[in-house]
């Protein structure tokens, strides 16, 4: 199934959850905010929220520096 992830097309398996996509991308769920189709996806639901074809997913992480 095709999604848009951070502005780029991506193929994922049918039934992939938000948490599954985070793991596939090597992102740590505890430090990533997720937006799906313009709405914030609560962290507590990442393991159960299945992605749908044509979803637009944005992952945002904070980067510190000085």
Image: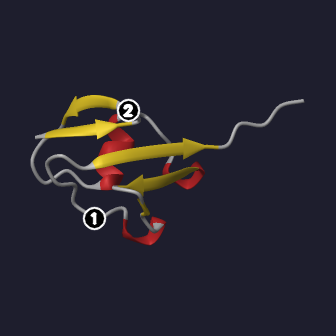
Q: Earlier in the sequence, mark 1 or mark 2?
A: 2
Label 2, on which residue?
Answer: 7
Total number of numbered labels? 2
Q: Residues within 10 Å of mark 1 (few under 14, many from 20)?
A: some
Image point (44%, 71%), residue name: 44
At 56% from the left and 54% from the top, the residue drawn is 30
User: At x 36% / y 56%, what residue is drawn?
Assistant: 36
Q: Nearer the observer, disc 1 or disc 2?
A: 2
Observer-nearest residue: 57 or 26? 57
Dot 2: element: loop
Q: Along the horizontal axis of the image, is 30 left or right of 51? A: right
Q: Residue at x 33, y 55 (%)?
A: 37
Quarter of the view holding residue 61? top right
- Work out whether residue 31 or residue 55 is closer to the camera in this orientation and state it: 55
> Please, which residue is most extreme toward the right here?
66
Q: Position of residue 49 (x, y in %)?
A: 27, 64
Q: Residues within 10 Å of mark 2 (few under 14, many from 20)?
A: few
Q: Is residue 3 shown above or below 19?
A: above
Seen in the image, is 53 located left or right of residue 17?
Answer: left
Quadrant where the image shows the N terminus: top left
Position in image of residue 63 (x %, y %): 71, 36
Q: Quadrant of the C terminus?
A: top right
Label 1 SS: loop
Report the disc number at residue 63: none
Figure quadrant of residue 42 = bottom left
Residue occupied by mark 1: 49
In percent of width and height, residue 65 lies at: 83, 31
The image shows residue 26 at horizontal and vertical percentages of 43, 34
Disc 1 to disc 2, C-alpha distance: 20 Å
Above or below residue 28? Residue 37 is below
């Amino acid at each position: 199934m095709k999604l848009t992830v951070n502005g780029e097309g991506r193929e994922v398996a049918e039934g992939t959850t938000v948490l599954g996509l985070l793991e596939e991308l090597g992102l740590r769920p505890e430090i990533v905010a997720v937006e799906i189709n313009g709405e914030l996806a609560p962290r507590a639901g990442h393991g159960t929220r299945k992605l749908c074809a044509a979803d637009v997913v944005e992952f945002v992480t904070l980067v510190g520096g000085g």
